[in-house]
C-alpha cells in the first residue's frame, strides 16, 4: 500500500534504521522488489502535539488573570525545538499555569516573545488568546519599550549614544551575526538601532542600560562588540568570562557564570485587556548580582 504521510526521506531513514524489512531481512533503498516479496514497516510513534508539563522552577515577578511575568534563568530555551524537546521554559509554564494561550503553536503555549538561551530576564507570557494577540501586536508595532542591562568590557567614551549599524548573518559562521558594513557601504543586512546609557563605570568595565529600537537576532551583543565593548562572558562576540581572581587579583579562579552578562530588565507596555500603562521589572539573578557586588566593592571609579 501507499503511505501518503510518510515522505521519501523518512522512508530512506527507516530503511537505514532497519525499521523496514523485506522477507524478514534488512534491506537497502536501492533494492528492486520482486513478486511475492513481503515488506514490513515499523512506523515510529507520532510526535506529541501537546507540550509536556515539567516541574522546573521558574521565578514569577508579575501575575494577573491574563499575564505572567517570568524572570528567565540562563541556560534554558524558551520552547521545544529540534534539539530541545524538554527542559524548556514552555515545559515549565505548562506545569505552573492552569491556563495558557494557544493561538500560535502547540509547542509554544503562552510564549509571546523570546530571549536567547543564555540571556536572562523578563518575559511576558499570555494566559488567554486575546491577551496573546493584543500583546503580540504591541511588539509588532514596536510600541513596547524594552530595556536591558549589560556589563561590558572597557568604558565607552560617551555617557550615552546611538548605535546605528545594519546586522546580517555572519559570512563564515552560520550561528553568528555581524554588522554588515564594508568600505562605508551597507552590505547585505537589516537596519538595526540601539540606544545606550552608561549607568556605572568601573576600572575596565561598565554597566550599560540598553534600549533597542529594532529587534534583530543577537542585536545588542553584536552592536556592543562592534563598538569595542563586548558583553562580559559573551565568547561568541569576543567577550571574556570573568572570575573573582581575574577581577580583583585574589579569591577564586572559578568563572562566575558561563553565559553573557545581558539581562532583560524592564518592559513598558499597555495591559492587553485593561489598556492601562504598565512597567514590569525583573532583578538580576545571583550570578550577575555577585558580579556587580565585586565590581562595586573592588573596581569602582
Image: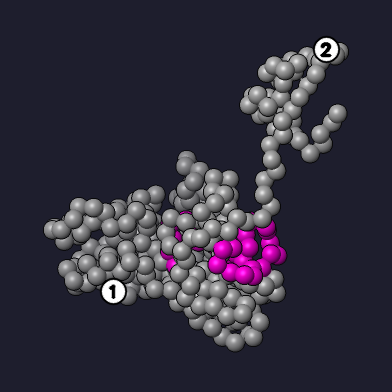
Question: Is residue 43 shown above or below 243?
Answer: above
Q: Residues within 10 Å of mark 1 (few under 14, many from 20)?
A: some
49 vs 193, left or right, is right
Q: Is residue 35 above or below residue 274?
A: above
User: Could you tell me how many numbered marks the image carries?
Assistant: 2
Residue 92 pos. (x, y %):
53, 61
Q: Is residue 145 visible?
A: no
Which numbered disc flags the more N-terminal residue, 2 or 1?
2
Q: Is residue 98 inside the magenta stretch?
A: yes
Residue 39 in percent (x, y) is at 78, 21
Residue 28 location (% of width, % of height): 69, 18
Q: Residue at the left extreme?
A: 250
Tag shown at residue 144: none
Residue 6 location, quadrant:
top right
Is residue 198 visible from the viewing direction of this image?
yes
Q: Spatial distance from mark 2 to mark 1, Cα to Cα? A: 78 Å
Q: Which residue is mark 2?
A: 34
Classify mark 2: helix, strand or loop. Answer: loop
Q: Which mark is residue 200?
A: 1
Q: What residue is drawn where x is 47% and y is 42%? A: 173
* Disc 1 secondary structure class: strand
Q: Is residue 104 magenta?
A: yes
Give whichever of 162, 96 is nearer the camera.
96
- Characterize the magenta stretch by its predominant secondary structure: loop
Give the x, y percent position of residue 242.
Answer: 26, 56
Q: Nearer the viewer, mark 2 or mark 1?
A: 2
* Applied colour scheme: one colour
Q: Are marks 2 and 1 in contact (CB under 8 Å)?
A: no
Where, quadrant-wise, is the N terminus in this rendering? Answer: top right
Q: Which residues are magenta?
A: 94-121
Picture layout, residue 29 above or below residue 163: above
Amino acid at each position: 500500500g501507499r503511505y501518503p504521510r510518510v515522505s521519501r526521506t523518512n522512508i530512506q531513514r527507516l530503511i537505514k534504521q532497519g525499521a523496514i524489512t523485506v522477507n524478514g531481512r534488512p534491506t537497502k533503498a536501492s533494492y528492486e522488489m520482486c513478486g511475492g516479496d513481503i515488506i514490513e514497516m515499523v512506523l515510529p510513534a507520532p510526535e506529541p502535539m501537546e507540550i509536556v508539563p515539567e516541574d522546573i522552577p521558574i521565578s514569577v515577578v508579575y501575575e494577573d488573570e491574563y499575564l505572567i511575568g517570568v524572570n528567565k534563568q540562563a541556560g534554558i530555551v524558551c520552547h521545544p525545538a529540534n534539539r530541545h524537546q524538554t527542559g524548556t521554559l514552555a515545559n515549565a509554564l505548562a506545569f505552573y499555569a492552569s491556563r495558557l494561550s494557544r493561538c500560535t503553536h502547540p509547542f509554544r503555549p503562552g510564549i509571546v516573545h523570546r530571549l536567547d538561551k543564555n540571556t536572562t530576564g523578563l518575559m511576558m507570557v499570555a494566559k488567554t488568546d486575546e491577551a496573546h494577540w493584543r500583546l503580540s501586536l504591541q511588539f509588532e508595532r514596536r510600541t513596547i519599550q524594552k530595556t536591558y542591562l549589560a556589563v561590558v568590557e572597557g568604558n565607552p567614551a560617551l555617557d550615552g549614544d546611538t548605535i546605528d549599524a545594519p546586522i546580517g548573518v555572519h559570512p563564515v559562521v552560520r550561528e553568528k551575526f555581524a554588522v554588515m558594513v564594508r568600505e562605508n557601504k551597507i552590505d547585505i543586512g537589516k537596519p538595526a538601532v540601539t540606544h545606550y546609557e552608561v549607568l556605572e563605570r568601573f576600572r575596565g568595565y561598565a554597566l550599560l542600560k540598553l534600549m533597542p529600537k529594532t529587534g534583530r537576532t543577537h542585536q545588542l551583543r553584536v552592536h556592543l562588540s562592534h563598538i569595542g565593548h563586548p558583553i562580559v562572558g559573551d565568547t561568541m562576540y569576543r567577550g571574556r568570562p570573568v572570575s573573582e581572581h581575574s577581577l580583583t587579583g585574589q579569591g577564586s579562579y572559578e568563572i562566575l557564570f558561563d553565559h553573557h552578562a545581558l539581562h532583560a530588565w524592564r518592559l513598558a507596555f499597555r495591559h492587553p485587556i485593561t489598556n492601562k500603562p504598565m512597567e514590569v521589572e525583573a532583578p538580576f539573578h545571583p550570578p550577575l548580582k555577585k558580579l556587580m557586588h565585586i565590581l562595586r566593592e573592588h573596581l569602582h571609579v
